[in-house]
Amino acid sequence: MYVKTITVGGYFANKRPDIKGRGRTGIIRKPMSNMRVVMEEKTDVDFYKMMLKGETPVGLSTVLRKVVYQNKGDFEHIRHQSHLLTSKGRYYRKV
């Protein structure tokens, strides 16, 4: 699941009268906000295209590092996956 869009808005809620001295009145407005998050699910093909371009999320690199560590990957395996495991590799793929 990926975040497609995030929309943040503000409005005034809970309007109520404010009674003051000497016959004056006003309105108390309480500012509120709302947030709308739209999630999107990408297919495996789109996900692998993102990996090859170097546009993978940062959290994915930690997951891949754990997988390589748990499987006791050798140096060649790590070298081939360097564009996924480090932020510098992802930046290199983008540029």
Image: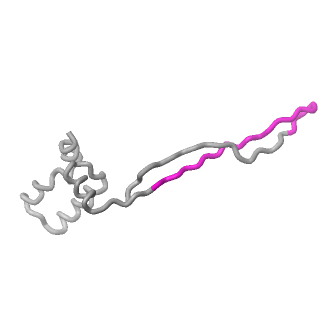
Image coordinates for residue 10, horizontal then vertical, percent = 61, 43
Q: Residue at x 30, y 51 (%)?
A: 58
What is the image's colouring?
Answer: one colour
Residue extending farthest right: 23
**Total number of numbered discs in the rendering:** 0
Image coordinates for residue 78, horizontal then vertical, percent = 12, 57
The reply, left or right, for residue 35 in relation to residue 24 is left
Residue 14 included in the magenta stretch of the image: no
Up the image or down, 31 lies above or below 59; here it is: above
Magenta part of the protein: which range?
19-38
Q: Residue at x 93, y 30 (%)?
A: 22
Q: Main secondary structure of the magenta part?
A: strand
Residue 29 included in the magenta stretch of the image: yes
The reply, left or right, for residue 71 in relation to residue 47 is left
Nearest to the observer: residue 25 or residue 55: 55
Image coordinates for residue 16, horizontal then vertical, percent = 80, 44
Residue extending farthest left: 76
Quick one: quadrant of the N terminus?
bottom left
Query: What is the quadrant of residue 92 in the picture?
Result: top left
Q: Residue at x 18, y 46 (%)?
A: 89
Image coordinates for residue 91, horizontal then vertical, percent = 22, 42
Q: Residue at x 20, y 39 (%)?
A: 95
